[in-house]
Image (cartoon, rainbow, N blue to C red):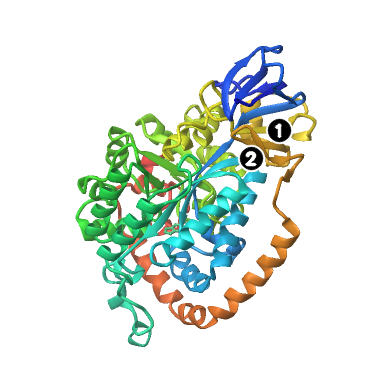
Amino acid sequence: MAHFTVLRGGRVLDAAGRDAPFRDILIEDGTIRAIGAPGLEAPADATRVDASRHLLHPGLVNGHTHGSGALLRGFRDRMNLELLLIVTPARFANQTLQIKYLNTYLGAIEMALKGCTLAYDLTFGLPVASIEELIVMGQAYRDAGIRAVMAPMLADTSFYAAQPGLLESLPPELRGLVSESGGTDAAEILRLMEEALRTWPHDRDHVKLGVAPTIPTHCSDELMRGSDRLVREYGTVMQSHIGEAKYQVVAAEARYGKSMLAHVDDLGLLGPHFSVAHGIWLDDDDLKRLADKGASISHNPGSNMRLGSGIADSRRMLELGVNLAIGTDGPASADNQNMYEAMRAAAQVSYVRQPDHRKWLTAPEIVRAATEGGARLAGMEHVGVLAPGKRADIVFLSLEHPNWTPINDPANQLVLVEDATAVRHVMVDGRFIVRDGRHVSADLARLAVEAEAARDHMARANADAAAKVAKLEDAVTAFCRGLSSKPYRVERYAAFPCRCEETGGFSAEAV
Ligand SMILES: Nc1nc2[nH]cnc2c(=O)[nH]1
């Protein structure tokens, strides 16, 4: 028998974002059936929820994170992307199955408490994690109650081989410390990925498996093409880190004779199922290719600043028709998993990025990107909007919180004021996963004890590898700085420090 719930007396953020009229919401078995004026008709036996003095908005969608990294939050400052890519894998190895679960669960609980109900998680690759471990990490999302796309990060080329000339540039005493090989070959990675897709046990509306060739230059074309075949065959989604740092796009251009994104397009990978993480160093041609194919970008401004990677031109993405989502990035490079902060950062970087304030992102555009845009990027269009037919993933913000006292403009306050402290309840499928500010099942005290122990285990198990990598830091960063100092086609994007001071900082084109 169908189960009905009716939320009465709440103020529901309207589609345009500038208003939040009083509306009742009728939910049938987790799906929104009707939204109407107060007094909306509901079956007599419907569960009644008092939503008065609350603003209701769709659950936020985190377009890009790494659930594998929760234990590394706050790890090291002054860390750019190249350091992140060589240092964190060394700090992060030797995770037991329990620690892999714990990492993912911790991040998922944090997101739930902060109003996020769907995350696109680029998780441990295959065979770094086994298929069984991926399934257990998927269970972490089920246990936390939020939805996820879990996309294993695939690579068959090492960081050192991905940048032509890097290995040769290393002094002989360092060369022996690095591996040229990406570990496992493409055919074996693809075999595992296909088996994982074929046998994935979780309900795909809640936790589905995606595919993430992690960075195109870290993947052979065989791995990229094979990933594409699997994504199309199994009807899932793909995400790749593209145009994140200048050194990467310069290295890619040297390798492919064209942009990283053009190479991916020419391999036939783009489509509505495809999304780019970061997309800072993309030019108009790259963006048009994405728009023409209906692809998306997860704009991750907090991480882009934390790593000094640059400031993406989010206005240009929208102008050229790319679907925009917003992400936090993983805890190793973005620390917390707070989508309200990510929205605020998206607003603020757009203000400093664009001289013309009429082109700054508006608050409703940002809310849309963090909800509907993210749901489209994740291929989960049954969520992201509060409307009949959509699943009832709903955040209740207390209107008695200082963030909302008084209400001047709902969208502006959601983006520029809210910091997750007014999150009171969170529903997924019409059921509370957070109630009165507490997760309904997580034991945070126990989690804290387990996290401390896990951190110590990883520090002990990885001490030698971390010491080895520490010796490489200066040589690697010097090489990447050299690449970043070379001219690149989107030099106008050097409009901010972005570690591009060598290229002259502000260019005439930017102002
Ligand atoms: N920011 C970021 N970029 C990446 N590119 C490949 N892996 C990562 C990662 O973990 N974080």
Residue drawn at point x = 46 percent, y = 77 percent: 469
Quarter of the image with the C terminus in it: top left
Q: Which mark is residue 115?
A: 2
Quarter of the rendered structure image containing ligand 1: bottom left
Pinpoint residue 430: horizontal percent, then vertical percent: 63, 32
- Compared with 317, 301 (above or below) is below
Residue placed under numbered mark 1 in the picture: 397
Which is nearer the eye, 274 or 508? 274
The amino acid type of the residue labelled 2 equals: Gly
Q: Is residue 202 above or below residue 396?
A: below
Q: Nearer the viewer, residue 236 or 110?
A: 236
| Residue 332 sits above or below residue 225 on the image | below
- Mark 1 Cα-neighbour bin, 10 Å: few <14, some 14–19, many ≥20: many
Q: Does the rendering let one see residue 354?
A: no
Name the one closer to the observer, 264 or 415.
Answer: 264
Quick check: marks 1 and 2 in contact, CB under 8 Å? yes
Query: How crowded is the residue under tag 2: few (<14 C-alpha within 10 Å), some, or many (20+)?
Result: many
Label 2 SS:
loop
Mark 1 / mark 2, whichever is N-terminal: 2
Gap in angstroms between the C-alphas marked 1 and 2: 9 Å
* Closest to the observer, 278 or 140: 140
The amino acid type found where label 1 is placed reads: Leu
Residue drawn at point x = 19 percent, y = 55 percent: 257
Q: Is residue 508 visible?
A: yes
Which residue is most to the bottom? 173
At numbered mark 1, what does the secondary structure look like: helix, strand or loop? strand
Name the quadrant of the N terminus. top right
Respond yes or no on whether mark 1 lies under 8 Å from ligand 1: no
